Amino acid sequence: EQAEIGLIGLGVMGANLALNIAEKGNRIAVFNRTVEVTRKFYADAGDLQGQIIPCETMEDFVAAIRPPRPIIIMIKAGDPVDQQMELLKPYLSDGDIMIDAGNANFRDTMRRFDHLKDSGLTFIGMGVSGGEEGARHGPSIMVGGTEDSWKRVEKVLTSISAKYNGDPCVAWLGENGAGHFVKTIHNGIEYADMQMIAEIYGILRDGMGMSASQIGDVFGRWNTGRLNSYLIEISEKVLKATDPISGKPMVDVIVDSAGQKGTGKWSVIEAQNMGVAATAIEAAVSGRVLSSQRVERLAAEKILGLPQGQRAPQDGMAFLADLENALLAAKIGAYAQGFAVMAAASKEFGWNLPMPTIAKIWRAGCIIRSGFLDEITSAFTKDPDAANLIVTPAFSTMVKETDGALRRVVSYAALGGLPVPALASALSYFDAYRRGRGTANLIQAQRDFFGAHGFDRLDGVDKHHGPWGSGLATLS
Ligand code: NDP
C-alpha cells in the first residue's frame, strides 16, 4: 500500500512530525540525506513501524507515495531547501506538491512558488509552531499555497494538528508565502511576549527583591487569571527549577544573553517594509541584541554604575496587581502590532489573510497559545476589518482598564533604572495611536524649512510652504 504523504528530513522536527503523522493513522514514506538517520528513526519507531515506509533512495521514496504526492521537506532552512528541491524534482510528476515546513523566509517561499509555477508541480510554504513537543503531539500549522494543493493535504494536516476545544489548529491562509509570513509574525509576537515577561521578571527580581521561586509563585497565580498562557506556565516552571550542580535556582546560573535565529528580525524588517509601527516587537528584537552584548554591558556597569534610588513599592500587593495588568496591557499592544503588520502584508501581497482564523489556529499547539487568543478570535470575528485590535470594543475596554497600571509600572521602572523597552514602547504606542493631535506638525515644518518638502494645512488653505526664507539665510 502506498503512503498518503512523504517526508524528507528526520532531524528533531521532521522525526517528530513523521511519528505524529503515522500515529494519526496516515501511512508515511520517509527519507533523510544521511541514510543511517533513516535507519535509526525506523528502528526506534516501535509500534508505529507498520505505518512508516523508510526509504534510502530518492527513487524508492517517490515511488512509495500515492500521486499526486505531497512531500514535506523539513530540513535546515535556506539554501539546503533549494538544493533538496532540485534533487527531488526529476523524480516528481504533474500535480505533486513540495511542502517546505521549515522556518523559511516568506520571500524565499514566494520565489520557490513562482519557480515551480509552470512546471506542473506546486509548492506549499507551511509554518509549523510548537517546537519538538508540538511536532510530536499537535502543532499549530499555517499553510500557504494554492487552494487545490491545500485540499490534497487538508485531511492529513488536520489529523496531526493541535486541537483547541476540538477545533483543529491548522488552516489554509492564502496563496504562496502567506503561511510562512504568518509564522514569521507569530514568532515576532512570541519575541515580544517573552521579552515583556522577562521585563516583569526583572522588576520583581531587581525592584522588589524577590527570589526566583517567589517570582515563580507570582506567575503561577497569574496563570490562573487573564494572563493564562503557555509562556507564563513555563516561566513558572523554569523559575522553580533547581540546578542539580550548584543547588541554586536554575535561572540564577544561566547566562543572560539570548540567541535568535532570524524570524524576529524578519518580522521587524517586514513591519518597516509595510510601513507599520511594530514598536514592541522591535524592542524585543533589540532587547535580545543588547542581551548578547554581555561583555560590553559588564564594562559599562563599571563605568556608569547603576541608577540609584530604587525603592521597593510602598504597597507590594497593589503593585503586584499593577504588574499583572501592565503585562496584559503591553501584550495587547504587541499582538495589535503583529496583526496590523499582517493586515498590511495581506493587502500588499493580495493574500486576503483571515484574521479571526489566524487567532483561532494560534489558540493551541504553538508557543504563544493562550486563552487571550480566544478573545482576539472573538474580536476579529465580530469585526474582521477593524483598523487595529485596540479599537475593537472588547480590547478598547481592556486597554482602558489596564493602561493606567502599565503607566505606573513603566514609571516605576524608569525611576529605578530598570530597563523595560518592550513595556515602555507598548505604552508609547497606545499614547501615540490614540492622540488625535500629534507633534509631527513640527517635523513637517522642519522638513519644509530645510528641504522645501511642503506641508498640508489643518484649515485646508492652499498655501503649502512656510514663511521661513530668512531662516535659510542664517544657515549659510
Ligand atoms: P535542523 O534545522 O538541524 O535540520 C536537520 C535536518 O536537515 C537533517 O535531517 C539534515 O539531514 C537536513 N539537512 C541539512 N542540510 C541539508 C541539505 N543540504 N540537504 C538535505 N538535507 C539537509 O533540524 P530541526 O529539526 O531543528 O529543524 C528543521 C526545520 O524546522 C528548520 O527550518 C527549523 O527552523 C524549523 N523549525 C524548528 C523548530 C524547532 O523547535 N527546532 C520549530 C519550528 C520550526 P542530515 O541528517 O543528512 O544532516
Image (tube, rainbow, N blue to C red):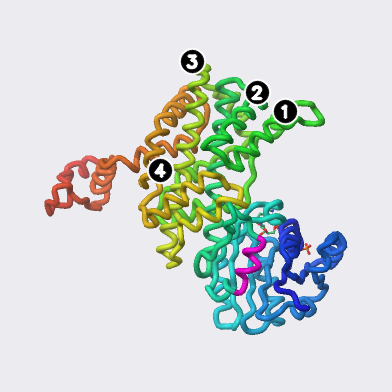
Q: Decide which of tag 2 and tag 3 comes sooner along the chain.
A: 2
Q: Quadrant of residue 219?
A: top right
What's the amino acid at mark 3? Gln
Question: Magenta stretch?
Answer: 152-160
Asked if the residue under mark 4 is in contact with the one under mark 3, i.e. CB atoms within 8 Å, the reply is no
Separation of residues labelled 4 and 2 (CA atoms): 33 Å
The local crowd at label 3, few if under 14, some if 14 to 19, many if 20 or more residues have their Cα within 10 Å, is few
Asked if the residue under mark 1 is in contact with the one under mark 2, i.e. CB atoms within 8 Å, the reply is yes
Residue at 42% of width from left, 53% of height from top? 380
Determine whether the beta carbon of the residue marked 3 sits less than 8 angstroms from the nearest atom of ligand 1. Answer: no
Q: Decide which of tag 2 and tag 1 comes sooner along the chain.
A: 2
Position in image of residue 232 (x %, y %):
60, 38
Classify 105 as above or below 222.
below
What's the amino acid at mark 1? Pro
Separation of residues labelled 3 and 4 (CA atoms): 30 Å
Position in image of residue 54 (x %, y %):
82, 70
In the image, which disc is placed on residue 211? 2
The local crowd at label 1, few if under 14, some if 14 to 19, many if 20 or more residues have their Cα within 10 Å, is some
Residue occupied by mark 1: 249
Instruction: Report the magenta stretch's main SS.
Output: helix
Residue closest to the eye, 75 or 127 = 127
